[in-house]
Amino acid sequence: MGGHHAASGAAAWVAIASTGPYTLGWYPLDATGILIGGMTTAGTALVCDWDHRHSTVAHSLPPVSNVVAAGIEKLSGGHRQGTHSLLGASVFVVLAAVASQFQVSTAVGTLSVGAGVLCMLMINLAAKALKLFPKSGWISNWIFALVMAGLVTWFAPEQWSWLPLSMLAGVVVHIVGDLVTTGGVPLLWPIVIKPPKFWRKIPVLNDIWRSNGALSVPLLGRAGSKREWLVLIPVSGYAMVGLCVAAWSLAESHVPAATALLKSLVGML
Ligand SMILES: [Zn+2]
């Protein structure tokens, strides 16, 4: 479920960059980093499914993303194999770190081209999975992604350092999401250890260490189950509140006139 992964990714980012820092001292970011990082992490929470040609990410930038999907599927041994392992997760994080190093010097200063493009791809992906603009089609997704990536470049270019962390949060959330809902994930891939014969006959345990060697903690039942929705609603609510608070404080510091107007309008009601 693409949308579910995306919402959990955004929620994880709000926890890491906003709620966490005030209570546990994790990774404090200002409003730009919370808002844009949240949207980016909603996208990075989807890249693990790039091993599947019908996934949202496979269709995100045709025909390139489709070709990449076919390539990853081959390399990683099929859907929910290599990209859903510790090794696969590390590769995604390293790629994000490498991409964020790619800069170009221009007359207006150094531009973080790699980070900007990656952020844009991820936010476009998130907008698609979350159906932010269901009626207006793909152009709105791209414009939205471009504006968001532009906001970071404009207001906080030094903040690009969070991109690899966003990738890490996204892939971890994705793998954990699949671990608790689906047929499990091969965490140690390419090493696959299958359980012995007697194990496969023990109820409950054979659902945890599965006959194909995958690990599963089926707390939420099958993907799309009622239990999954029950968890998802508060998780999405938490992400929305976190991102809206960040958006508001960003607006307050950059377009104070607009927020003052809104406040007085609310006051009149
Ligand atoms: Zn998956």
Image: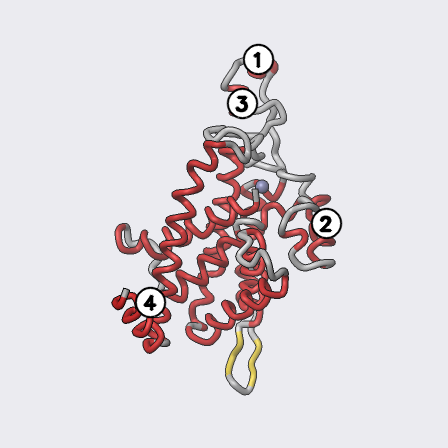
Residue type, label 2: Gly
Q: Where does label 2 land, which residue?
A: 71
Instruction: Please state which of the two labelled residues, at mark 3 or mark 4, is closer to the viewer.
Output: 4
Q: Nearer the viewer, mark 4 or mark 2?
A: 4
Q: According to the image, label 1 marks what residue?
A: 201
Residue that numbered label 4 is attached to = 249
Residue sitting farthest toward the front: 269
Q: Nearer the viewer, mark 4 or mark 1?
A: 4
Q: Reading the chain from its start, which is encountered first: label 2 or label 1? A: 2
Residue 233 location (% of width, % of height): 42, 42
Which x, y percent locates residue 116? Answer: 54, 68
Q: Tell me which image quadrant ligand 1 sits in.
A: top right
Image location (x, y in percent) of residue 177: 50, 39
Specify which label sits upstream in the sequence, 4 or 1: 1
- The earlier-in-sequence mark between 1 and 3 is 1
Q: Amino acid at mark 1?
A: Lys
Pointer 3 residue: 207
Q: Which is more toward the observer, 225 or 36?
A: 225
Gap in Å between the C-alphas at discs 3 and 4? 46 Å
Question: For the residue labelled by badge 1, is the local secondary structure a helix, a strand or a loop?
Answer: helix
Instruction: Kindly report the distance in space between the C-alpha atoms of the residues bearing marks 1 and 3.
Output: 10 Å
Label 3 amino acid?
Answer: Asp
On the question of residue 93 being in view, the answer is no
User: Mark 4: is the Cβ under 8 angstroms from ligand 1?
Assistant: no
Front-most of residues 121 and 102: 121
